[in-house]
Image (tube, helix red, strand yellow):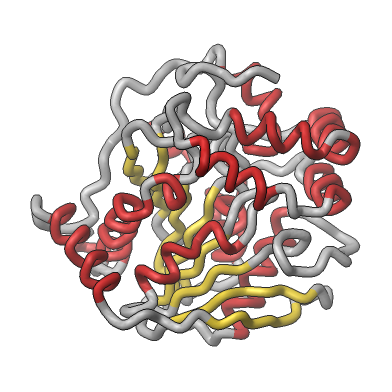
């Protein structure tokens, strides 16, 4: 598979269009998708100086004492061991969920940046990173239950969820399981669209590609997740980490996505939906709002699928803004 131009296929995003996991179908759908001429840039802080203040806040957190990051474990409802990293103290807690085939280390910069002011948690979903793969039933709801299990283990009462790619719909599912405890759901390069579904045949084809040709499939996927001028070292590092996911777990996961409709779950969401996206492919703000009216998106220029890896300081400043907006009273937003 050749690497597409930046204006080609809509992003292979498990929460945005259809995901990292389903690039082929995304490509077919994307060629008919109209480019969104302008994406609304979310103003989550009241002042026009909010971006500068947010950047200063992140810089201040880095300047403090180093946070101690703990490796912790808990059990999912089906008995699978879940491994997660946690640090810091303070509400709201920030809980980060990686994308498909990735792991919790994709959020290391956020743990370091925000641990001085918040309880910060990043987990490995089942089948990823250090978490177990001995799961009988796979799917988005089961991944959402993984997130709830970690939130319960940490006794998080007031939390903002962040999910990259696949992690986007996962944290929507988690929020539905935790009424009254979640302030908002924030997608990271995801939720470009919510109106899609994966057919059983599409899921089967993708799952078999990863089962039978894992290394080649991962490389092809990574090549389509970055801008053409992205740092090769960052790309290589992302690929290296994603190669750790067991092919058997990837196969079971991809098969489980057949029939999943993210719009159905998003319509049930009672908290705000936000996104911090790249511009490799357009975010259909108007289309998402037809499903979830309370949706806003920040779009980072010249950015691919992993803003937390490519430009962490800029991404962290957006996190500060988004969290500030979500912690305001509804009438003040």
Decide if residue 85 is on the left or right side of residue 250.
Answer: left
Residue furthest to the left in view is: 48
Q: Position of residue 146 (x, y in %)?
A: 68, 69
Q: Residue at x 24, y 67 (%)?
A: 328
Instruction: Give the vertical position of 254 relative to 149 (above or below).
Output: above
Decide if residue 228 is on the left or right side of residue 151.
Answer: left
Q: Quadrant of the C terminus?
A: bottom left
Q: Residue at x 40, y 36 (%)?
A: 303
Q: Position of residue 257 (x, y in %)?
A: 76, 44
Q: Position of residue 45 (x, y in %)?
A: 18, 58
Q: Quadrant of the N terminus?
A: top right
Residue 67 seen anywhere in this rendered image of the structure: yes
Query: How many numbered circles does the render carry?
Result: 0
Q: Position of residue 54 (x, y in %)?
A: 21, 60
Q: Residue at x 61, y 50 (%)?
A: 99
Residue 281 seen anywhere in this rendered image of the structure: no
User: Looking at this view, is 43 or 75 the one in front?
Assistant: 75
User: Looking at this view, is 294 or 319 the one in front?
Assistant: 319
Decide if residue 100 is on the left or right side of residue 110.
Answer: right
Decide if residue 232 is on the left or right side of residue 148.
Answer: left
Instruction: Give the vertical position of 329 relative to 296 (above or below).
Output: below
Q: Residue at x 36, y 31 (%)?
A: 302
Instruction: Give the vertical position of 108 relative to 42 (above or below).
Output: below
Residue furthest to the front in view is: 233
Q: Give the quadrant of residue 171.
A: bottom right
User: Looking at this view, is 118 or 193 the one in front?
Assistant: 118
Instruction: Give the vertical position of 189 relative to 28 (above or below).
Output: below
Q: Give the quadrant of residue 126.
A: bottom right
């Amino acid at each position: 598979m050749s690497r597409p131009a930046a204006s080609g296929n809509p992003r292979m995003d498990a929460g945005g269009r259809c995901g990292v996991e389903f690039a082929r179908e995304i490509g077919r759908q994307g060629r008919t998708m109209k480019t969104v001429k302008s994406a609304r840039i979310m103003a989550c802080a009241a002042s026009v100086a909010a971006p500068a203040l947010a950047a200063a806040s992140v810089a201040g957190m880095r300047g403090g004492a180093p946070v101690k990051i703990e490796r912790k474990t808990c059990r999912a409802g089906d008995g699978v061991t879940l491994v997660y990293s946690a640090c810091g103290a303070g509400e709201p807690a920030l809980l980060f969920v990686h994308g498909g085939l990735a792991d919790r280390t994709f959020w290391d910069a956020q743990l370091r940046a925000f641990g001085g002011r918040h309880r910060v948690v990043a987990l490995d979903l089942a089948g990823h990173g250090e978490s177990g793969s001995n799961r009988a039933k796979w799917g988005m709801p089961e991944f959402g239950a993984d997130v709830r299990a970690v939130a319960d283990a940490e006794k998080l009462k007031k939390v903002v969820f962040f999910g990259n790619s696949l992690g986007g719909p996962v944290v929507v599912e988690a929020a539905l399981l935790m009424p009254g405890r979640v302030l908002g759901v924030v997608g990271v390069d995801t939720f470009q669209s919510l109106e899609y579904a994966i057919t059983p045949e599409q899921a089967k084809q993708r799952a078999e590609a990863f089962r039978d040709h894992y290394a080649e499939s991962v490389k092809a996927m990574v090549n389509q997740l970055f801008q053409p001028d992205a740092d090769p070292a960052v790309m290589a590092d992302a690929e290296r980490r994603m190669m750790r996911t067991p092919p058997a777990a990837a196969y079971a996961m991809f098969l489980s996505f057949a029939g999943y409709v993210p719009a159905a779950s998003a319509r049930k969401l009672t908290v705000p939906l936000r996104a911090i996206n790249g511009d490799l492919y357009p975010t259909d703000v108007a289309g998402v709002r037809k499903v979830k009216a309370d949706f806003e998106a920040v779009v980072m220029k010249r950015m691919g699928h992993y803003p937390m890896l490519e430009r962490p300081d800029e991404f962290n400043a957006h996190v500060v803004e988004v969290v500030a907006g979500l912690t305001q009273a509804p009438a003040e937003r």
